[in-house]
Amino acid sequence: MSVKFKGTPTSLSGKQINVGEDAPEVILVGKDLNEVKVGGAKGKYQIINVVPSLDTGVCATQTRKFNEKAASLPNASVFVVSVDLPFAQGRFCSAEGIENLVVASDFRNKSFGQNYGVLLAGSPLEGVLTRAVFVVDPSGKIVYKEICEEITQEPDYNKPLEVIK
């Protein structure tokens, strides 16, 4: 699969997963350096909000919007996943008042990027994650997937929530 960065096609590496398939459970690193597990069966919905870097305007906006929407979802856990260092994620959350979602970093081995097929390859952003949103149902199945065609554009915020409600 390919996406575009400022109009230029770039490829993704890793295993593409699709709606109806099991969501791989991946261990990431939280802003406090503790393990954060995403994917797999958790007994509630998971919205996995994937961004290239919290240090960009579009990624910050995407994270703020999902943080706002997460406050009204008692039956879901909401995550933001990037390859930013956990310390930078923590600073971002503190500065932005992000309290309703869990930040998780894929910086160590890029296992999320590889297992979900969202690791950028062959572009100026090679090695970071592309912009995407996954919804995992309580039994661990992917019930929604959006990989943004253009990395610099925001995802649909309503469709993932509609899947849960």
Image: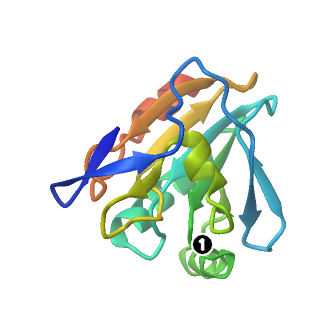
**Above or below: residue 68 compared with residue 59:** above
**Above or below: residue 22 compared with residue 96:** above
User: Mark 1: which amino acid?
Assistant: Gly
Q: Is residue 159 left or right of residue 76?
A: left
Determine the secondary structure under disc 1: loop
Residue nearest the viewer, comparing 1 with 144: 1
Quadrant containing the N terminus is: top left
Q: Residue at position x 36%, y 67% from top? A: 125
Provide residue 139's location: percent of width, then percent of height. 75, 22
Residue nearest the viewer, comparing 61 with 35: 35
Total label count? 1
Judge whether residue 165 can be spotted in this image: no
Provide residue 17's location: percent of width, then percent of height. 53, 30
Q: Residue at position x 67%, y 75% from top? A: 86
**Above or below: residue 77 compared with residue 33:** above
Q: Residue at position x 36%, y 45% from top? A: 155
* Residue tagged 1: 97
Q: How is the image coloured?
A: rainbow
Question: Where is residue 136, by image quadrant?
Answer: top right
Provide residue 50's location: percent of width, then percent of height. 51, 52
Quadrant containing the C terminus is: top right
Q: Residue at position x 33%, y 49% from top? A: 11
Provide residue 148's location: percent of width, then percent of height. 33, 44
Judge whether residue 25 can be spotted in this image: yes
